[in-house]
Structures are given as C-alpha cells and as structure tokens.
Image: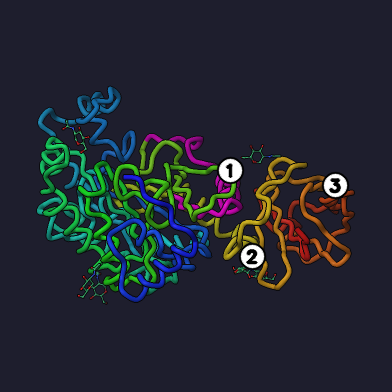
Amino acid sequence: MAVPRCSLFCLLVIFYVSSIYGYEPTWESLDSRPIPEWYDEAKLGIFIHWGVFSVPSFASEWFWWDWKGQSTPAVVEFMAKNYPPDFTYADFAKQFTAEFFNAVEWAQMFQSSGAKYIVFVSKHHEGFTNWPSAHSFNWNSMQVGPHRDIVGELMNATRSNTDLKFGLYHSLFEWFNPLYLQDKKANFTTQNFVKFKTMPELYELVNNYEPEIVWSDGAHGPVDYWQSREFLAWLYTNSTVKDTVVTNDRWATGTLCHHGGFYTCSDRYNPGFLQKHKWENAMTIDRKSWGFRRTARLSDYLTMEEILQTFVETVSCGGNMLMNVGPPHHGHITPVYEERLRNMGKWLKVNGEGIYKSKPWTYQNDTLTKGVWYTKNNSSGSTTVYAFVFNWPGELLSLGLPLVSEVSKINLVGDSTFLDYKPRSTKGVDITIPLYSVNELPCQWLWAFKITAVEN
Ligand SMILES: *[C@@H]1O[C@H](CO)[C@@H](O)[C@H](O)[C@H]1NC(C)=O
Ligand SMILES: *[C@@H]1O[C@H](CO)[C@@H](O)[C@H](O)[C@H]1NC(C)=O
Ligand SMILES: *[C@@H]1O[C@H](CO)[C@@H](O)[C@H](O)[C@H]1NC(C)=O
Ligand SMILES: *[C@@H]1O[C@H](CO)[C@@H](O)[C@H](O)[C@H]1NC(C)=O
Ligand SMILES: *[C@@H]1O[C@H](CO)[C@@H](O)[C@H](O)[C@H]1NC(C)=O
Ligand SMILES: *[C@@H]1O[C@H](CO)[C@@H](O)[C@H](O)[C@H]1NC(C)=O
C-alpha cells in the first residue's frame, strides 16, 4: 500500500490529537509518537540472551533450527556423537538449571558497565518463556528447568538495586510451533498462533512486568497477520508504561528500518553516517553468537578497542549501542564478559560527559585524521565538541573540522590541563600533545579531546 507522506506540520497535528485521544493502529499515528527522551540520552544498553539454547551452548542460539530446521552438519554431528538417538530439544530444558543465577549480581554487573538500560530475552524463537506464561504450557521457566520466574527476579533486582531501565526482548514467531506453521502454510490467512499464543503472552508480559523497552523480533509474516499495530496502539495509549515505553522496528516483514520506535535495521547495524531517525546498533561481544558458546576462543570476543570504536561511531551517528552478553545455563556470567562490562564502565566514568545526553555534531568523523569521531554537548549555551581518537596522537593532533577561536579551550577528557593549539587556515585545529606517561593517561583504549566554543 502506498502511504502519502506526512509533512512535519501534519505529524505534529497527529501527535497532538493522538496524545489526547490515543493512538490509532495505523503507522501514521504510531510513527508520530516521539521516542521518550530518556532513551536517546542513555546511549548504552546491555542485551542478555538466555534460554534453553544456553544448555547445548554450541554453534549459537539458533541451535534448534540448525539441528532440525536446516540440518547444519556440525550441529547434526554434535548431536549424533554426544546424545542418544531419541533425545529431543525439549530434553535440554531440564538441564537449564540456573543454579548460580543471582539476579541482584547480574543487575549490579550491568550497572557497573555504565549502561542505562537492559534488554532481557524473555522468549527467543524456540518459544520457551523465561516467565510463568499462562500461554506456554510446560514450556516455561517455572514448570521446567529453573522452576523460577527469571523475568520477575531480574525485574525486581533491576528496579530495587539499580537505576537501569528494564526492557524485554520477545520473539513474535517460533520456529516449530505447530500453530505458527499452520498459519504460515495457510499463507497467513489464519491467525491461530497470533490469537492464542504470541499476542496473549505479549500483553501478559507487559501487564505483569511493565518493561520500558519492548524489543520485538522474529517478525516473519505480514503486519495484518501479527496485529502488531493494534498491540502498539494499546501499548502507547492504555498500558501502564504508555508514557515511558520505547519500542523497536521489528513488527512484521518489511517494517525494519521503516516503522515503530527506534530502528535496528539489521543485526550489528552501524551505518557510519548520520541517520535521520533514532536507531540502535544491536551487537554482541562474541562475534559469532548471541547465546553462550562453550567453544568460543578468546579471539572470538571483541576487544575493548573494537567495542569502544563501534560504540563511538554509533553514538556519533545518533545511535545507541545494545551490547549483548550470553550467560551459560547455570547463570554465572563468565569472566571474559564480566571484564568487558566492567572495562566499559571504567571508560565511561572518564568519558561519559561526551557520551550521555550528547547529540551528533555537524560532522561525524574527521577528514584529516582517520579514526576520529565527534559528539556534541551544547548544554552550556555554546557548542562543546568531543573528538574521540582511536589512536593515541603522538606530539600533534591535527583535526580538519572544528572551527575554533581564541576563547576555545581544549583538554584531554579526564585531565584538566589546557592544551596549546593553533587554528588551521580555514577550519580545523592543530593541538600540541604533551608527553604523557602511560599511568598519567586518564583512560585506556580510546581517548576524547574536549573543545569548547566551537563555531561550526
Ligand atoms: C518481586 O517483588 C515483589 C514485591 O516485593 C514480590 O511480591 C514478587 O514475588 C517478586 N517476584 C519475584 C519473581 O521474585
Ligand atoms: C499469499 O499471500 C500473498 C499476499 O496476500 C499473495 O500475494 C500470494 O499470492 C499468496 N500466495 C499463495 C501461495 O497463495
Ligand atoms: C484504550 O482504552 C479505552 C477505554 O477502555 C478504549 O475505549 C480504547 O479502545 C483503548 N484503546 C486502545 C488502543 O487500546
Ligand atoms: C556537558 O558539559 C558539562 C560541562 O563540562 C558537563 O557537566 C555535562 O555533564 C556534559 N553533558 C551534558 C549532557 O550536559
Ligand atoms: C569517515 O567514516 C566513513 C564511514 O565509516 C568512512 O568511509 C570514511 O573513510 C571516514 N573518513 C575518514 C577520513 O576516516
Ligand atoms: C542543544 O540541545 C538542545 C537539547 O538537546 C536542543 O533542543 C537544541 O536544538 C540544541 N541546540 C543546538 C544549537 O544544537
């Protein structure tokens, strides 16, 4: 269907009307809702993939599909070699024991990363719900495996021990749910899966746990089939989180990067230039998987340099980063993940002033020196620009873009010493870098220079 484009004025009118009379289940109405400000200010969230797939923890969280759906040889062989022939995927659920899962420890560890929100996988494509859903008989964390309300414990721990916002991931489709497969076979002309499974549990999830992010996924099917616009109209109008909730864009085939709240577009989306619409880079520390992998090698985990470079590029271009950790089936987060989280927090403690609540500047990356990305903080009335440099600059840092004047001041973030600088002929600046010994540097991995009174 061709939708006529709405002008800014028209959007404002729709938003005004919607905020009084409620949202309509149309994209015109739903897309007119401004994304609550807290989300743009937050910049960093932690994504957590945990489920029955964390038991085999082999290949990835797509294990069941790899095994029975597309018969990936390595996975088929792994099962043949290590399990009896009658072993089913459902049998793994008993071993999802969660004996070391301590929701308070998790919440505090996520907080220590400097993140401002978390997004926990409440149900992945396998269909197992990490809460006692009334719509997932015998395939939920209360009846099988942990025998605990994982979502509830994490919600409580997050809300009573941290100031992190609590968000939930939810997969609309399920690989092997017979109701979904029947609907799909009928070319989505029947809706039994939507009516009796996925939508009732999604409403249940929001009513019981009041997530401030609803991160939808697995949107394989047309929008009329999923009834996701009806859900969003209710979420934005009548739910208890209507004023603060943020959503993403994975609501049906074809909505990614086009409709909903912030855009995720594709996994690990990192376009490298300024985006018109608020977006999120959902990425994972293990470059090969979102779920825990027992066979991961050290080189499979992103280094701090890689994580921070991705983060800075993302924030420069107006995005948030949602960084994923995959805990093992027993619930104790492994030290490699813990180290990345705590290091992120150490770095943000020093450099957060150029990150949180920042806005994209006129330019995103420098033209003269490679690996320099910018953010802006205009809270003081004049523009302050932060130049994040990927490589330590040696004696001189030449930037091609910031237009500075005599009143500008430049310092390395985390060190109050003002540095000598010379404006370049048209724009840009040459900054003299003094000799710092390694332990005088305020942080490792990637550094920020703060430039005040920038005129462009
Ligand atoms: C969460 O906290 C509430 C209030 O203290 C309590 O009633 C509920 O049982 C807790 N839920 C879980 C799953 O621990
Ligand atoms: C399935 O539905 C779509 C959209 O309504 C239609 O274009 C397509 O021809 C249908 N396919 C079959 C096999 O009926
Ligand atoms: C919101 O609730 C009101 C009152 O119950 C109802 O009339 C309206 O249809 C609801 N709107 C949505 C989008 O759920
Ligand atoms: C902006 O700069 C001021 C002064 O350096 C600092 O206190 C503040 O945290 C920065 N960030 C925001 C969003 O104001
Ligand atoms: C700026 O970023 C873009 C997108 O990543 C890249 O193509 C370009 O080479 C960068 N410019 C410099 C000078 O590094
Ligand atoms: C400064 O920041 C405020 C709040 O984020 C924004 O509304 C305003 O447009 C910004 N001003 C400039 C000149 O960018």
32 or 63: which is nearer to us?
Answer: 32
Disc 1 from disc 2: Cα separation: 22 Å
Disc 3 from disc 2: Cα separation: 25 Å
Q: Amino acid at mark 1?
A: Gly
Identify the residue position indicated by label 2 in the image. Answer: 353
Earlier in the chain: of badge 3 and badge 2, it is: 2
Ligand 5 within 8 Å of the CB at mark 1: yes
Q: Quadrant of residue 16?
A: bottom left
412 or 442: which is nearer to us?
Answer: 412
Q: Amino acid at mark 3?
A: Glu
Whether the magenta-drawn stretch holds residue 452 is answered as no
Identify the residue position indicated by label 3 in the image. Answer: 395
Mark 2: give few (<14), some (14-19) or many (20+) Cα within 10 Å.
some
Residues in magenta, as a range? 295-323
Could you say which disc has been placed on residue 20 in the image? none
Earlier in the chain: of badge 1 and badge 2, it is: 1
Foreground mark, 1 or 3? 1
For the N terminus, which image quadrant?
top left
Q: Residue at x 43, y 67 (%)?
A: 164
Identify the residue position indicated by label 1 in the image. Answer: 272
Query: Percent x, y for residue 62?
Result: 29, 37
Foreground mark, 3 or 2? 2
